[in-house]
Structures are given as structure tokens and as C-alpha cells.
Amino acid sequence: MAEKRDLLGGPPATINVGLEVFADTLQELGFPVVQVDWRPSAGGDHRLTDLLSRLEQSGDSNAEGTN
Amino acid sequence: MRNTIEEANQAALSNMYDADPVLVDVAPASEVMPQLGEGTLLHAGPPVQWPAMCSPMQGAVVGALRYQGWAGTEEEAAALASGGSVSLQSAHDFSAVGPMTGIFSPSMPVFVVENRTLGNQAYCTINEGLGKVMRFGANDDSVIERLRWIEKTLAPALREAVLRAGGVDLRPLMAQALAMGDEMHQRNVAATSLFFRAIAPHLVRGSSQQASLSEVTDFLVGNDQFFLNLAMAAAKSAMDAAASINGSTLITAMSRNGTNFGIRIGALGNRWFTAPSLMPEGLYFPGFTSDDANPDMGDSAILETLGLGAFAMAGSPAVVGFVGAGTYRDALNYTQEMGEITLGHHPHLSIPNLDYQGVPSGIDLRKVVETGISPAINTGIAHKEAGAGQVGAGIARAPLECFHQALEALVNEMESR
Amino acid sequence: MTVKNHVLKNVYRDSVALMRLSREMEGLENVAQATAIMGTDNNKELLAQAGLLADSGKSATPNDLIVAFDLTPPGREEAVMTSVQHRLMSGRQGTSGGTSYRPRSMEGALQTLPQANLAMISVPGEHAAREATKALDLGLNVLLFSDNVPLEDEVDLKQQAISRGLLMMGPDCGTAIINGVPLGFANAVPSGRVGLVSASGSGLQQVICLLAESGEGISHALGVGGRDLSDEVNGAMMLEGLRALREDSATEIIVLISKPPAQSARDRVLEAASRCGKPCVISFLGEQEERASRGNIQMEDNLESTALRILKLLGKEPPGWAFLDDKSRKQIESIIASTDPGHRSIRGLYSGGTLCYESLFILRNLGHQAGSGLEREQVGGDLLIDMGDDRYTVGRPHPMIDFRSRCDALVQAAADPEVGVVLLDVILGYGAHPDPAAELAPAILEAQKIARNGGRRLACVVALCGSPDDPQDMDQQQKTLTHAGALVVHSNALAARIASAISRGAAGPLPGGDTRG
């Protein structure tokens, strides 16, 4: 798991996923922001996203089994 | 939450990053690959039989059969191959990799690269130079003659020198070449020079073949891409060290046979997942266009599998000119894009102008499927007709379909446990 | 075919650079085929095969650059070489920049911005939970703007966040301001002593704007999404926000805003607030309960009273925005005098859901049988519609950004002979329309004209929710709307009371004039 990142300690540095107008505002005001060129996971192919979730689950359940 | 996949991938990455490839010998293929016997040839990419082979690969098979003396003429060779009496096998199954057509026959000398960390070995043929060469499907007498010279003159001289040197450490050499602007797929001029500097004293000192020394040195200095095959063997030794780890989603091989593109993943060992090879995008030599090009071909994508080639473009901006605007920014973008589908950065292969950050290294099957970002591969472009040779160079993408198939197979495997 | 070779002695260029140059040369006038290549034996052979090797080229050494081209028709050789020399010596033109890489994933973005601590997510609802989970896995706090996220996903996401010590604002969180950084629909308000946690975006904006107009700023404003105080979510994130503000040294007063919460959420929030050690103003909008003070907690039931309470705690004089000036008062009296009591129904057309909700209960408290578009039950003549509700935004932008649907509804209302008052909100700030008055003023003029043509008079009352520092220029917005004939106030509650006064034909109870309170 990644290290948690405290939010209220200073001006946030933002990763914007979605509406670009929010990133534009931050950019214009000079706050750090990166826009993600977001596309639906696996190109929106539900069969593939389902496979990815099943893979994650089987990884977890196998881990539980071996612990 | 850590699960078996993350643990498996960490284990695979450690093996891959810790690999310490050393050139320990230059030996006939049959000597180090005993299974490569009479009647057997190896080829690049996932397994493919004669009828499905592209023209350049068929040309190379014909050439190898003549070189090996199993056929006298082209017609005899073609009849032999099409009759099914030659066993054609994927080089990857022999811990071997070959550029473009990637043909191995028993008598061909190969570089023997040993991963000193785990002790596994990998093999690659010796680069023939430019022009009419077997890796592009050429098979006339001049090609056979050069292969014989490599076998009889070059390889013994190199073998003596390598043994006298006590092996040549490739990891520091490759790190230095990367710092000098090579990504070691399209561009090997620095690596080749460094290799020559490392081997020259041992070639010269006490050589038993003084007479042929000038031929050998002329050959080495006349081919900027000489090191490509050494880099490939080094990459193969690292990727084999990371292969066959239960639960790992690491891509352990990417390769093309000129017809199909294939990948392997850590969890599923030697299984290939294949889809038709795509056409590279690039620049062409005088007199050629994309109409002349064969689909993407060769085992050299093992370099991208490790994190070199297109993945290391930020350290090799001269190479990015093949596509798009060709600016340094474009080179950087390739490296950043590939960073989105890799599990880490290679600790020993770093890019000076990225503040010595390592190249993005270790392609994750899940990330490729999830982002839809397909691995980019720097590549030479072969003429689609056997024997015409190289017509250009450019950048190809791996077909995503391979990754989709691999994911499905992996889920089935994991769920059936 | 006229093949020319120029040999440039001891000139080296990389082979890729030369292949690019070759391609560029082939675009020059008269050039049928061209190659620039170093003079190695192998390269000369390639040139010969392509029919591009002339006698002069044969003498080139590996250190020489051969420029070979075929001129068809002949001529322009000098011009071609000038162009080649220029390209060789001047580097690549106009391409020094190139476009920056746009990361495709949050992990990719983290490589560009390693110090990132917040993911703002506004992807379509069906993908939102997945992206939010990824962000939390990466250790990022989340502001989830997306709506249409299943309730069970919200519960799950907030539990994940809590177990990681992260904030999960939303789903359907439109507004937050953290250390002065506006996120989503937010206003340019000063830094100050008041920290807020809100389950309502427009409610939050109303309170901080009223504070800003009185010169008071905020430390942080955290949104938690409209369902945070439901039975299922049980105030999970409001409690986390409260905890964060309790520990935040800049925050002196804590403000919590929500529509009426579920009982258990209400109990948890009140219990935590009572132990937070700072004065708390809790605004459960429309709760039919006496405004009360218990220890450090002050309960309020509308946004205006919440802002007033905060200002009082800060020791501020009663602000101007709470009162009507004489001119407005006279205008209201004149409207009442010229309006037929049979044509005085109220039609509210809102972009802020909570502002709509607040107006609705204020009207009901004043004895109106007001219905809402949401409930679809038209009990009396008065009807308020939240045009930001999903039902009205299918396939079009939010009414804070796009005024077309509200302008259409305004003109339609004007044609209804029963309607005597139109209530509107205009929300300024980042993310909102850059010039709402320019959109709304013509519709207001047209609506009044339609009413006049029907022999009626239509009152337009606007709650202008903005901060003096907002990019839209609040003063100019007010002037434009006033000029179009609207009655403009800054408190949404006051706007609702004005509408009620006009509708009932009695301006008496309104604050202002001589009474001042």
C-alpha cells in the first residue's frame, strides 16, 4: 500500500481525472495539478474489466489460503 | 493489501533486476544446445511451421539448410522444409533469441551469456552485418560464405579472446552505452565501441590466428549494430531468470515470427499468446516504401521486455526521429508512456538526462490491459520478399489481443486452483 | 532521370537524422527521389541499387556525407542544395518543444507530480468507484465529483478511506476549498478561521459567500456528498472531516452543514461535535426544531442564520446582506400594489439543490403549500424545481454552467397566468458559467414582456450567491440583473421571504427599512 498523503497540511497538489475545467482553474491560479488523459478501463470492454477484477480477487483469495 | 500476484511480481522483478549477464563463451550452437541436433532449426518468435512462415523467414530457412549442408540447392532446401522433414522450433524454447528471422542451425556459432546471479545461460547468433544477410531472409552464396567465415574465422578468434578475458561483463557495459545515447535496439554504436575496446586487447594478445586478425577487426568496426545480439542474449538471460513464477503477471517474452506476435507471462511459463504482427511505422531506405515492408519480425523485442529499445528512448533521442515530429520531447513521451505499463524502473540501467532514473522495466499484463497502452518496439523493417534485406527502421506496437488472451488464460488458471 | 551527388567532406550526421532529411528532400520541387547518407561501402551499394549513385559519390569515404537526388525535370540543383545545407546546419525547425506527455493513469500522473495528495475525479458514474479505489490505493485523498455512484460503493469507498487515514469527499461532491485552493465549483473567498464540512455543495457555497461578503474567510471547506448522513453511510466522512478540523490549528470555529440527517448519523455527529473542543455551528437545514445552544454546539436550520451565527461568534456586526435597502423595499411594495392577488404563485427555478431545498422549507414555514418538482406532487400553486437534479440534466451540462434550460423554463413560467413571482439562484465562482447575467438578463426581460402582454406583472427575485473576489465580477452581475428588472439579494433565504411577501401581498415582515432587524 502506498504511503498516505496528508491533505490539510498545505495547498493540495491535485491529479485531475475527468472534467478538464477543474484542472484549468488550478493551473491558472498557479496550483500544482496534472490532468490525466482518462479513458475507461480496458477501453470500456466489460469482459476485460471483469477479468481484471476476477484476477485481483483470485490473487487475494490465494493469498488468504496460503497464510 | 498484498496478494499473491504482488508477491510473485516482486520475486520476478528481483530476479530480473539482479541478473548479471556475462559473455562467457562463443561456441557452436550444438555444443551449448545439445537438443539442437540434426534436422532441427530454430526461428524467431512463437512457433510457426513452414507454410505459415513469411517469405523472409522461409528464405532464411532455405539458406540455413544449405549452410548446414542438409540441402544442396534452394529447390532441395525448400522441398525439404515444405515436406516436413525439418524440425522448426521456437528459439525461445532453447533459451535463445535471434534478430529478425532469428534462424539458428547446429553449426552456427552463438554468444553464450551467463547470468552470474542465478547461473542460467542464454544464446544469440553473431550479427552478420548489413546488406544481404540471413536475418533478412537473404540466402545466396555470398550469405552462406559470410556465415562460414563467421563460423571458421570470427567465432574462434572471439572465443579465444573471451576466454582469455575471463568473460566480458555486459551489465556495466550496457549501462555505460545507455548513458552514451544507445537504447541498444536501433542504436548500438556506443555499445559496439565499448565492446570492441573491451575485447580488442584480448583479441590481439597471443592470438593463435594472427593472419586473420585484420579481417576480424575490420568486421567488428564495420558494423554499428554488432552489439545488438549481445544485448539480446543479455536481456534473454535476465527475462528467463524472471520466468515461470506462479501468479506473476510480468511479461517475460515478446517476440514476432513475421506472421504472428507472441508474448509469455510469468505465471504461465512457456505458453505463447499470439496475434497477427502489426506493421511498423517508420522511415525507409532509398527506393523503398511501406508497400515493401514485412510485418514486424524478430526476437529483438526481448530488449523492450527488459526496458531497453523504445522504453529507453528518453536516453536515446537520436532514435526517435523515426516517427512523429521526432523531437526530444517525443522521445521522453515514449519513456513516460511505457512507464505506465511497467512494474518498476531498472536499478542498473539509468538515463542520465532523467536524473539517472532507471528505464521503465518489467511490463505488467494487468497494466497493459487496463490502460490499453501497447508496448512500443523499435525495430528494423525487413523487405517482405526474401533476400531483399532491410528496407527501413521504425517503431511497431504489440497487438493488444495477445494480452487479452493471456489475461483470460491467467484468470482461468488462478480460479481453477 | 538526372542523378546528382554532392559529397560533403568530413560531415557527420546520425543515420536517423539523415533518413528524416531524405524524406524532407523528397518534398522539394523537382526532386523525384533523394537520399542523404554517410559514405560507407554498404551505403554506397544501397545508393547504387536505388540508381542514385553518381561518379562523384563513389569517391566518398565513411566520414563523408553523400547528398544524392534525382531531379525530374532537371534544374534547381542549386536551390535543392541550399535547402539541404540550411536544414543540415540549422537543426530542426519549429519542433524544439513538442507536446508534453499526458499521463493515461493516476500512477503515470504521480510520476509527473510525485507530491500529489489529492485525486479529483469526475468521470462517468459507472467508472467512478473504480477510479476512486485506485486513488485510495495510491494513498491519495479523493474528491469524487461524479454522481450516480451506487450507495453500497460509497459506503465501501469511505470505509477504505478511513482505514487508510484518507479523506473521501463525495460522491456527488461539487465543492471543496483546501488551504485556499478551490476544487470543483468553489468561490474565491479569503483565508480565515472558519472550517466547514458540508453534505451540500451549494449550501456550502452560500455560507462561505455570505461570510466573505462580511470580510470573514475560511480555513478549509470539505464536501462529503449529499448521502453522507444517510442511514447507510452514517456520517462516516463528516466525522472524519470534523476530526481533521479539530486537529487543524487554523480552524477556530467548526461548521457542519447537511439536509436533515438519519437519526443514527445525527447522534454520532452531535456526539463527536460535543467533544471537539471548538465552537460548532451545526446546520441541519429545515429541521423543525428550535434553534438551540448546547455547550459548544449551536444548532441552526437555514444557511442565512448559520452565517449570521458564525459572524456573531466571531464578534462581527450584523451584515448588510441580511437587510433590504429602501429602494428594494419600495420596489416590492410597488410590485404588490400592481399585482392581482389571483396571479401571485411562486415558480422557483434553481441550479443549487440545497438552495432550492432551503427555499422550499422557508416557504412552507411561512404558510405556503409549496411543492417541489422532485416530489412531483403539486399541492398548491407554488412550485420549486431543482434543475440540477439528474432528471433535468440528462444529456446536458449542469444549469450552473449552461443556462438554456432555465431560460426556457423562465419564459414558459411567464406564460402561465397563475405565476406572479419567479425565484432564481445565480451561483458564481470557479467552474460556474463565466457570465451568468448575460445569459439570464435577456430571458428575464422577455419573461416580463410576455407577462405584460398578458396584462400581468411578473416579479423576478434572484439570489446571487457569490464572493466579491469571484472571477465573474459580482457587482457587474448584480447591475446587469437589476437593470433587466430583477430584484437581487445575496441571501437565498431572504430571496425566498421576498417571494413569499409578494405572493401574499404583504411586505411588512421583511427585514430592513427602518426596522433593521
Image (cartoon, coloured by chain):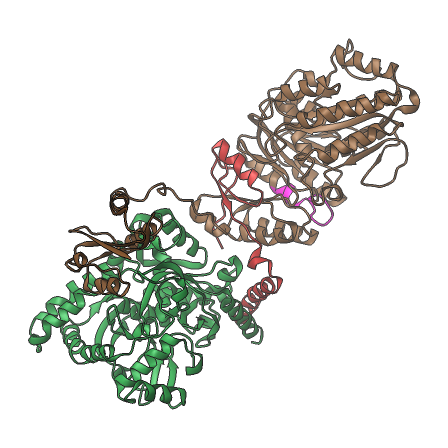
Chain colours: A red, B green, C brown
Q: Is residue C78 above or below residue C349?
A: below
Residue C295 on image: x %, y % = 69, 30
Quick check: B311 above or below C495?
below
Residue B71: x percent and y percent? 29, 89
Residue reaching furthest right?
C342
- The residue under the point 56% across, 59% down is A42
**The quadrant where residue B144 appears:** bottom left
Residues rendered magenta in the picture: C228-240
Q: Quadrant of the N terminus of chain C?
A: bottom left
For the residue pair C156 and B261, the one nearer the viewer reads as: B261
Residue C130 drawn at (x, y percent): 59, 54
Image label count:
0
Taking the magenta stretch, the answer to whether it contains residue C358 is no
Q: Nearer the viewer, residue C512 or B292?
A: B292
Quarter that holds the C terminus of chain C: top right
From this viewpoint, is residue C425 visible? yes
Q: Residue at x 47, y 47 (%)?
A: C102
C102 displayed left or right of C480: left
The quarter holding residue C329 reads top right
Which secondary structure type mostly characterizes the magenta part of the structure?
A: loop
Q: Taking B300 as reference, is B141 above or below it?
A: below
Between B28 and C74, the one lying in front of the other is C74
Viewer-proximal residue among C514 and B329: B329
Viewed as shown, does residue B152 lie left or right of A35? left
Q: Is residue C237 left or right of residue B324?
A: right
Residue beneath the point at 27% across and 89% down? B72
Measured as percent of width and height from the top left, residue C375 is found at 83, 41
Classify residue C427 by image quadrant. Answer: top right
Q: Residue B172, can we see it?
A: no
Whether residue C462 sits left or right of residue B225 in the image: it is right
Residue sitting farthest toward the top? C514
